[in-house]
Image (cartoon, grey):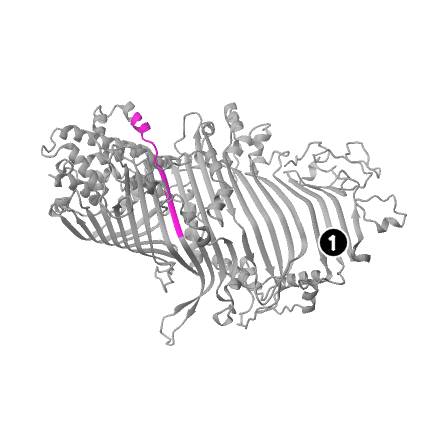
Amino acid sequence: MLESYVTPILMSYVNRYIKNLKPSDLQLSLWGGDVVLSKLELKLDVLEQELKLPFTFLSGHIHELRIHVPWTKLGSEPVVITINTMECILKLKDGAQEDHESCGSSSTNRSTTESLKSAVKSRRVQQSASPDPDLPPGYVQSLIRRVVNNVNIVINNLILKYVEDDIVLSVNITSAECYTVDEFWDRAFMDISATDLVLRKMINFSDCTVCLDKRNASGKIEFYQEPLLYKCSFRTRLHFTYDNLNSKMPSIIKIHTLVESLKLSISDQQLPMFIRIMQLGIALYYGEIGNFKDGESEDLICHTKDMLGNITGTEDEASSVMQYPTQYISQDPYFHQDDDQQQGWVSWAWSFVPAIVSYDDEENDSGGIGDGTAEQQKSQSLKDPIISVGFYCTKATVTFKLTEMQAESSYYSPQKVKSKEVICWEQEGTTVEVLMKGELFFDCQIGFVGCQAMCLKGIMGIKDFEENMNRSDEEACFFNCGENLSVKGMTYLTNSLFDYRSPENNSIRAEFILDAAHHKETYTEIAGMQRFGAFYMDYLYTMESIGGKVPGNQQDLSSVKSEDFGNVQEMSTKSLIVGPLNLRLDSSAVHRIMKMIVCALEHEYEPYSRTKPDITDGSRTMPSSEEVASLEEYIPTRLTTFTVLKCTIIIPVAEFNLLDHLLPIIMGEKNLSGLLNAASFQPLRPLPSVRILVDKVNLEHSVPMYAEHLVHVVSSLGQPSDNLLHYCYQHCYLKIFGFQAALTSLDSKGLYCIPVPVIPSFSTAVYGKLIKFPKYWTKRAHVPLTECIFELPNLTVQATRAQTLLLQTIYQSWCHPVGNVSSVVVNEALLNEVFQTSGVKSKNPLPTLEGSIQNVELKYCGTSLVKCASGTVGSIKICAKAPGDGGKEKLIPLIQGPSDTRDLHSSKWLNESRKPESLLAPDLVAFTIQIPQYIDYCHNSESLKIKSLGKTRTKHCEDGDSTPNGRSLRRCTGKYVTGGTGKPASHLDL
């Protein structure tokens, strides 16, 4: 009856993962309604083959497994699967051989899958004529769907451990429960109907603890560190949307997790291990280790097909088998195991997504195995689902601690670790959202509403923020950015499953932006700052098919073939925006940051991947005209933009300076300084500081996606076009707007005085480009390897004598360590002279020295034959401002150029302020420096050319022309000529 239909579903999953289990005993226990299995060993090889991750399981066991099936109320009560104490230990796979074997060859996978499919279909043909006459097929289908959609899974005491080198990472979850909910996210027994094609589930995680410890050479942990994360609870909402009742896979999947409070604690010994774990994740993402090793393109394509393509094949067959009575499946109890071993980890993940079973596949498959057209149409009809994954955190705190060993009073007592908090990072309204659809669209957005960093306790023997210091929170906070949630609101939850205004919470089908142009118009810099305020990142990757042919795998950069460039157009953009921020780099903050850097460098871990040496192939073949044409039409690039808005940086005088103990370690040297002695600390007030304001900083970086292939093709061309050469470089463009600096002072009340300007607002820009794989271009003397351009429209610096002395004091306090506590004493009279009392007008203004420079442009270019630098300076002016008669300032010019010296003999020339006659006046200085790399080619060249040009200078000099001093000069406009050859070395164009 019902048992014959439901039992195979449960048995298939239990048999798949558990060793030495007798199906007959399990079947009899299930018919009794309750199953209790103890001390179970997991099939580690099955887990490894299904997950297809670059990890191997060292051990895995379940202490107790309980299965409760309410046979009398199967249509209204859920099946409950309870796992008590499950522990698994993993490590990274050793070498590429295991990775190769774990994936297997594509031919073996295809042959095994085809044989399994034929076995399934033969069983269907033989046994489909004998269904149970008492249960109609529609009822069975509906019942199985309701049972599968409402299964409750409870895991108590889940322990996962990862070991690598001396690292032991363990995750312990006290309780995790997954159950079905209604539209209000309350526990309920639900089913999918034609009017509501939605299934909702909830997963509650209770008391999640993450530990990171170090083991010795024998594999034992000598002492345990404090947990990274201690007893953190969070909940996950899952929302599945189907197109119709016969859909086997949801068309839209939303998985969102919310954490109310996240408190991380990292010690100095855990920091290198924590960074190592992060580097592991990055290496896995970019395919630098594991199954994604060099030369394994065949296995990688096989892996991708397993993950994405076989969802339409193997999984459909396995899920359809579950429709049949137990007598048809029990003939081969391990059939499901063999079948599912050929699936990827995505297919395995789909097994936990409720599948809506239909009999339409039997009718479609009745034509036999050889009906390739039907299989192709079925594959094309299955569309990639839209997947939305989100992580949301209301408040997160990361605390960095310094540890020291303490021995007990007894000699034989074990050592204990004592930790002291030194720095704390607080963050509010954190959002991480990922939206993807197959291989053609991927978008990741990260943002947070506000953040701040604070100093705690003491550092390196300096008790600057101990409790007895009674310092305010404003003094402890040295960095803040964004706003508070109380002001901003819950904007970080917009359109999430935890937002009551989202379409899913109002029974509306959600719409997603999957077009690159529309995405850029919607998610702009302004929109990101309005939602978050402190930080916003948007990473977008799209792949568009041009010729209707999409390569099997575009994620492996090394396996991309030349003909693939014409079939797809890929685009990758990454935008990072930082909102208005305030940063105070005082002694307490700088020493804590430097100490964290020192702790992060104290390790001996080998990198997961090393940079490949540039290997040039001498027997390169010329690319075809079709390849060149496709490259001329479109070249995929990765574009990154980084923007900082309204940045305020305050650098006060160093109250203490112990950098001589930290800088040698950072620079890779040994610290030869003596031991630190604890010293008393007293805050210095008033505290003179330099305040820097920047309106906007913008950094753009672009690099070709497939640089090695592109450079290989372009460098083999006789005369590549400027467009192709442009994409062979990585480009970087830095623009700074509204930079200004001033002197200020912090008083005992925690208030800053009115700033005294030193550098008025100015803007500047720097552009540079570096060729990729330079060894391919050694025989191309005309191709620049490096170019750089610096532009400065104007810069003015002004200061009085007192301001100059104060700037010197601040500089010396940082650059000249004098012991544990700085003995810098700021003269009170000097401060009074620099910072005038507000509201009081000075009777005798102090003389000011002012210097300005305009229209500065510097260029650098390097080729395999010559290194060249050139530049121009429009004008320079240095003058003194002194009080004059009637309260007016009197300008005393010291240096000024260019200048009209026709009236030099008259007395009024010294008393008047002189300006250039017009904006088109000639530059003051123009210079060109050429340094040959090979003397044989440049024996006739001039290595140094400097021109000082006044009003009557010769602007352009050609071969044979003469300069005002009668000297012959060879120079071409925009070109730098190597001696004797007459060939241009570079074109410096922005």
Q: Quadrant of residue 24?
A: top left
Label 1 neighbour load within 10 Å: few <14, some 14-19, many 20+: many
| Residue situated in front as seen by the camera: 786 or 375 | 375
Name the side, left or right, on which 342 lies relative to 828: left
Residue 888: x, y in percent? Answer: 79, 55
Would you name the residue on which mark 1 appears?
850
Residue 834: x, y in percent? Answer: 69, 62
Name the side, left or right, on which 215 lies relative to 179: right
Above or below, 224 relative to 937: below
Q: Is residue 389 magenta?
A: yes
- Quarter placement of the N terminus: top left
- Is residue 883 visible in the rendered image? The answer is no
Name the side, left or right, on which 329 lies relative to 970: left
| Residue situated in front as seen by the camera: 684 or 44 | 684
| Residue numbers of the magenta segment | 376-393
Q: Is residue 960 magenta?
A: no
- Is residue 643 visible in the rendered image? The answer is yes
| Residue situated in front as seen by the camera: 120 or 587 | 587
Which residue of the protein is positioned furthest toward the left in this rendering?
Answer: 134
Q: Quadrant of residue 832?
A: bottom right
- Quarter placement of the C terminus: top right
